[in-house]
């Protein structure tokens, strides 16, 4: 029965691009009380299908399950390849290490194309205010938000795009780092 509940909740997630509220789950599963929803949610948490963030909202967990990792593919000169199941990989846990501090952003613009980040891609960002030099960061600079390489020159910091068409950004007043980019998702 729990598998059926999980499937309905994740079908809602696929349609709405968000997890349902307790009231929506109550309606979705045909329950008459939020207490019944609470019990189902706890079973789903115990089974590892969902989690709760710091504000108590539901978050999906292990959406992708495991996928076979078959080996390597040559991106240069073609070589003979043999299919061999090396392992399995859970894309959810591979892409997101710190779920409570992670979020997605859709990329607009071309200032990071030489880093392999194109307009329309999704970046996985993890909240931090302590980046390392050369990290790709999400930063607020003089009131505007951008994504660039984090650089240091002497005692000051600046942001560097990954496109020769654009120059470095030196803050006139202030710069605040909100997150570090941890991955890029592109769908063809």
Image (cartoon, rainbow, N blue to C red):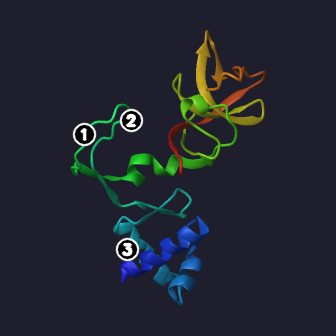
Q: CA distance from mark 2 to mark 3?
A: 44 Å
Crowd rating for badge 3 (residues with CA inside 10 Å; few <14, some 14–19, many 20+):
some
Q: Is residue 7 above or below residue 89?
A: below
Q: CA distance from mark 3 to mark 1?
A: 47 Å
Q: Which mark is residue 43?
A: 3
Q: Is residue 43 above or below residue 65?
A: below
Which is in the foreground here, disc 2 or disc 3? 2
Q: Is residue 67 visible?
A: yes
Residue located 69% across and 20% down the image: 168
Which is in the foreground here, disc 1 or disc 2? 1
Crowd rating for badge 2 (residues with CA inside 10 Å; few <14, some 14–19, many 20+):
few
Crowd rating for badge 1 (residues with CA inside 10 Å; few <14, some 14–19, many 20+):
few
Q: Are marks 3 and 1 in contact (CB under 8 Å)?
A: no
Q: Which mark is residue 129?
A: none
Q: Is residue 130 visible?
A: no
Q: CA distance from mark 1 to mark 2?
A: 12 Å
Rendering coords of residue 114 (x, y %) = 58, 28
- Secondary structure category for the residue under label 3: helix
Q: How many marks?
A: 3
Rendering coords of residue 181 (x, y %) = 54, 37
Q: Nearer the viewer, residue 39 or 180?
A: 180
Earlier-in-chain disc, 1 versus 2? 2
- Secondary structure category for the residue under label 1: loop
Q: Which mark is residue 75?
A: 2
The residue at which mark 1 appears reads as: 80
Q: Nearer the viewer, residue 82 or 90?
A: 82
- Secondary structure category for the residue under label 2: loop
Residue located 53% across and 23% down the image: 134
Earlier-in-chain disc, 3 versus 1? 3
Rendering coords of residue 162 (x, y %) = 61, 26
């Amino acid at each position: 029965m729990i598998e059926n509940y999980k499937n309905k909740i994740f079908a809602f997630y696929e349609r709405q691009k968000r997890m349902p509220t307790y009231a929506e789950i109550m309606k979705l599963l045909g329950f008459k009380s939020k207490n019944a929803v609470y019990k189902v949610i706890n079973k789903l948490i115990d089974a590892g299908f969902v989690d709760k963030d710091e504000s108590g909202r539901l978050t999906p967990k292990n959406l992708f399950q495991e996928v076979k990792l078959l080996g390597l593919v040559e991106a240069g000169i073609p070589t003979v390849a043999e299919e061999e199941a090396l392992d399995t990989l859970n894309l959810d846990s591979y892409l997101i290490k710190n779920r409570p501090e992670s979020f997605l952003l859709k990329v607009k613009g071309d200032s990071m194309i030489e880093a392999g980040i194109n307009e329309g891609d999704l970046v996985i960002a993890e909240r931090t205010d302590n980046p390392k030099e050369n990290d790709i960061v999400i930063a607020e600079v003089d009131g505007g938000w951008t994504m660039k390489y984090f650089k240091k020159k002497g005692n000051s910091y600046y942001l560097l795009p990954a496109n020769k068409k654009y120059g470095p950004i030196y803050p006139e007043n202030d710069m605040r780092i909100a997150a570090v980019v941890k991955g890029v998702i592109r769908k063809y």
